[in-house]
Image (tube, rainbow, N blue to C red):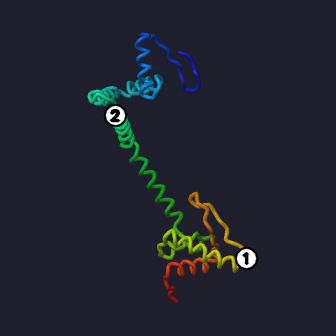
Amino acid sequence: MSNTGRNKRLASFNCDVELWEKFTRQCRDNSTTATAVLIDFISHYVDNSLDELAMSLEKITAQGKIDWEQLIKQQVDKYLEQRLPSYLDKYIAELQQTGKEHQINPQNQEYWLVKERAKYLGIEITDNQLIHIELYANDAFKQRHGTLPKKKLFRNIESFTYPQSDVDILDAAILKITGIEREN
């Protein structure tokens, strides 16, 4: 064995030429490499899961053809079964934490996005209404300031943002477009 880099070893062994050629041909036919198959085999051997591999291969070859989709699905299911619960627990904990940190507090808001403000007001808006609200609010903002409101990237979408000091413009646009009467 020789060293081929960080945490890797070059392994060489003697193998019957005909057997090796059949093996590499089979690997090519299955769109893989001899290295990948051998490493996978070694991993199963080390994990003492060769019986499991052999049973799944037995089922596949008993059918007369390899159902790659089924084989991959089984492996993905096994992986998810092992890893998903801990991932979901961590993900939910992070969501709950960020949810607490990002609850909308109007006193802490420097600027508002249309959907965020509508949600704060308890109003659901459609994408079509969103466009009209922005047009209406942008027109009023431009009349007041001579420019359009600034845009910021939010969830990979550039959206107009309205400063807290101009929230009245945004509220008026939301109420006008949604047809909700403001109670005084």
Image side of residue 178 versus residue 51, left or right? right
Q: Position of residue 106 (x, y in %)?
A: 57, 74
Residue that appears at 46% across and 52% down: 91
Q: State which quadrant residue 172 falls in.
A: bottom right
How far is the residue under mark 2 from the one under mark 1? 65 Å
Task: Point out the frontmost of discs 2 and 1.
Answer: 2
Q: Is residue 30 above or below residue 123?
A: above
Residue at the spot of label 2:
67
Residue at the spot of label 1:
146
Badge 2 element: loop
Q: Is residue 124 above or below residue 47?
A: below
Q: Is residue 15 above or below residue 5?
A: above
Image side of residue 183 versus residue 73, left or right? right
- Furthest residue toward left: 62
- Between 13 and 102, the residue placed more toward the observer is 13
Identify the amino acid type marked 2. Asp
Image side of residue 138 versus residue 59, left or right? right
